[in-house]
Amino acid sequence: MIVYLLACTDVEKGSPAANPDTHVLVVGAGMAGLTAARVLHDAGVSVTVIEARDRIGGRTWTADVGPAKVDLGAAWLHGVNGNPVADFADANGLSYEEENFRWSTLYDEASDTQLGDSGWEQIEDAYDSFENALPRLKANLGDTDVMAARSRWLSDEGYVGTEARLAMFAVDQWMVELEYAGPVDQVGLEEFWEERELSGGEHLPTGGYVGVVDALAEGLDIALERPVTEVRAEADGVELVAGGERFVGTHTIVTVPVGVLRAGSISFSPGLSADRLAALDRLDMGNLEKVVLVWDRKWWDGNIEFVAAENSGRFPEFYDLTELAGAPTLAGLYGGRFSREVQAGWSDEEIVADVLDVLGAATGETPPSPSYSTVTHWTTDPYTQGSYVYLPAGASSDDLAALAEPEGERVLFAGEATEPAYYGNVHAAVMSGIREAQRLGVESIDVPGWEEW
């Protein structure tokens, strides 16, 4: 009884969290699910996390690629001030380091030229120019896609030749397909570039996100390899069917990605609200993917940028992860339209072979065969159906807010796509998990680092 009274000091009187009979079933052991479960568990609430995969972490996945340790999903802390991920890391003895990548090679395929400093300056200037032009373009063009705005801007600025290619690359790759992960002809203009940013600079967790994931999960009851297929809400509780098993609780927090909800992989009874279904129909998942190559020796110099001749988005960016990964490693990132085409029909062998062709052209050297490689498939993964949410033309942040609303009193939702101000980021997922734990009545968070949240 004394222990129960002490736990109750952290929760709202009369709330589900204050009821000793409350048992919350969290669907998904990604960052949102683990966060919600951690906060509830540390407030004295009974929780079970149900995860479809044979691992925890969701779209954060630190994997061994031979001797290298690489984040195959989320890899950055985008700002550390006011970031709950950084706050948790600071309080739990986990470190992160400021991004210090050196960009050395900028290759223009159309002219078969390494462009050097002047090329970098042209891309950066175009990036700034388009950002400054966005208010005018939005006012003049209304609810359209970013490609339409980019085309108008290119015409207005009078870019031609190499300058036009680099300006197009700045918008299509740097600002859209490597950032929002959706195709430039589908990402909506109306709220483009308007989500909030955290200050403090770009950082990467030391040793990958696995340290944060494992610390969040410590001591939690997690059932792995249990894909949830049914969520049934009754007047007195909820019942979930997962991996052929039946789980019973008083509440559930569903944290699966938008792609899974859009695919209808989980049936809900009662059915999802018309507002939620309409929001899901307007939203879409981006397709940011990685190709990780590991060698016995380092044969290249720094990070590499590849400007494809036909503006195809073909493997545009390679990060030199050698110091972070502990072995000579390049990670190629690609997204948007090109990613969808690759994921729809290319084998892993074809992907790696084309990447090596790109690297050979960009560096002017013949790359040795990598000792180890891995290719991500977030786009076709049944438990993600994409990398993270974006807003197509016709969608708005109101749709993200609609996803955050509960279905009745017992079925709640969290995940990066339910945080309108910060969607698409790990900190959005964590914020949403904290939010839903608070919705259930947690008032004073006991998790180290989150006492002020």
Image (cartoon, grey):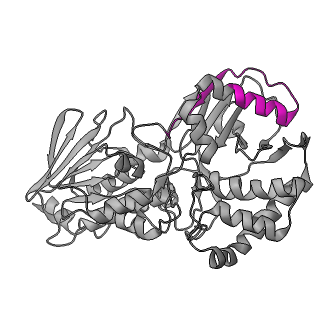
Q: Name the quarter where the C terminus is drawn.
A: bottom left
Whether 441 is among the magenta residues is: no
Task: Give coordinates of residue 173: x percent, y percent.
Answer: 69, 52
- Please tell me how many numbered marks the rendered image carries: 0
Q: Name the quarter where the N terminus is drawn.
A: bottom left
Left or right, 22 with respect to 53, comes to left
Task: Give coordinates of residue 328: x percent, y percent.
Answer: 72, 30
Left or right, 367 with respect to 75, comes to right
Left or right, 95 with respect to 155, comes to left
| Res. 51 visible in picture | yes
Task: Give coordinates of residue 280: x percent, y percent.
Answer: 38, 57
Task: Give coordinates of residue 350: x percent, y percent.
Answer: 65, 25
Which of the two residues, 27 or 448, is positioned nearer the viewer here?
27
Span of residues in magenta: 353-379
Which of the two residues, 180 or 246, is positioned nearer the viewer here?
180
Which of the two residues, 61 or 38, is positioned nearer the viewer here?
61
In the displayed structure, 394 sits above or below 336; it is below
**Residue found 52% across the figure and 58% down from its top:** 86
Which of the two residues, 381 or 139, is positioned nearer the viewer here?
139
Whether 364 is among the magenta residues is: yes
| Res. 207 visible in picture | no
Residue 172 sits in quarter: bottom right
